[in-house]
Image (cartoon, grey):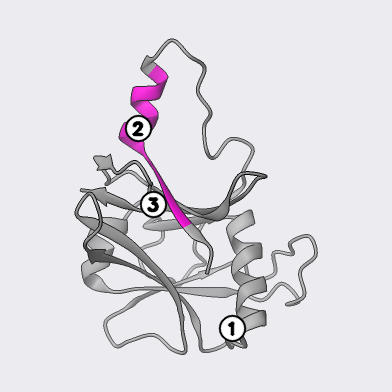
Amino acid sequence: MSMVSLQTETNRSMQAESASPTRDPLAGRTLLEPAEGSADQKAIRITEHALKRIRTAMAKEGVSPDQGGLRLGVLGGGCSGLSYSIRFDSKPRERDRVYLFGAGVPTVGDVTEASAVRIFVDPKSFLYLHGMVLDFEETLMRQGFNFINPNSTKSCGCGSSFTA
């Protein structure tokens, strides 16, 4: 899968205090809330860019939107102590929180007929991911998912690990 990077609330507030102009990673992005019936309505949000990329990747990997989904998690390790995990799973586990996003929301170039995507989060990872936004960035320099996580207090230089 693509590169994972991180933008923390702490980093953004420090940048705002500096004299140079800052760039809000969510400026101009449309945030999607989980559908009713999802676990914890405001716990995790995604952008339309992330929705489009998840749909495309699920179709490419042959993951059924009716049963499978994208698993977000946190693992011990990395430069700063914790690392993000992102992968596809065929079904949720018993204690997972399941979030539905984007049912009926078309995205440009979408081949999935605006089907909902499901995101699975295990209880341990939820402690670190509550309140985060999953975005997808595609520029000339890099491409990948961004975890914009208010629970992160510090991240490493490469952006793939964090401290909570």
Residue 88 place in picture, x, y as percent: 48, 79
What segment carries the magenta color? 4-16
Q: Mark 2 belongs to which amino acid? A: Asn
Residue 32 in view, yes or no: no
The mark nearer the N terminus, 1 or 3, is: 1
Q: Is residue 15 left or right of residue 69?
A: left
- As measured in the structure, the alpha-carbon distance from the residue carrying label 1 to the one carrying label 3 is 22 Å
Amino acid found under the numbered disc labelled 3:
Met
User: How many labels, in total?
Assistant: 3
Left or right of 124? Residue 45 is right
Which of the numbered marks, if any, corresponds to residue 65? Answer: 1
Q: Is residue 131 left or right of residue 60?
A: left
User: Main structural element of the magenta stretch: helix, strand or loop?
Assistant: helix
Dot 2 alpha-carbon crowd within 10 angstroms: few under 14, some 14 to 19, many 20 or more: some
- Residue at horizontal 59%, vertical 83%? 65
Above or below 129: residue 37: below
State which tag comes first along the sequence, 1 or 2.
2
> Is residue 32 located in the magenta-colored stretch of the structure?
no
Q: Is residue 151 above or below residue 104?
A: above
Residue matched to label 3: 132
Residue at image coords 74%, 64%: 106
The residues bearing labels 2 and 3 have C-alpha atoms spaced at a distance of 14 Å
**Coordinates of residue 86 in the picture (x, y in percent):** 42, 69
Percent from the top left, x then y, of residue 46? Answer: 52, 56
Disc 1 element: loop
Tag 2 secondary structure: helix
- Farthest right residue? 109
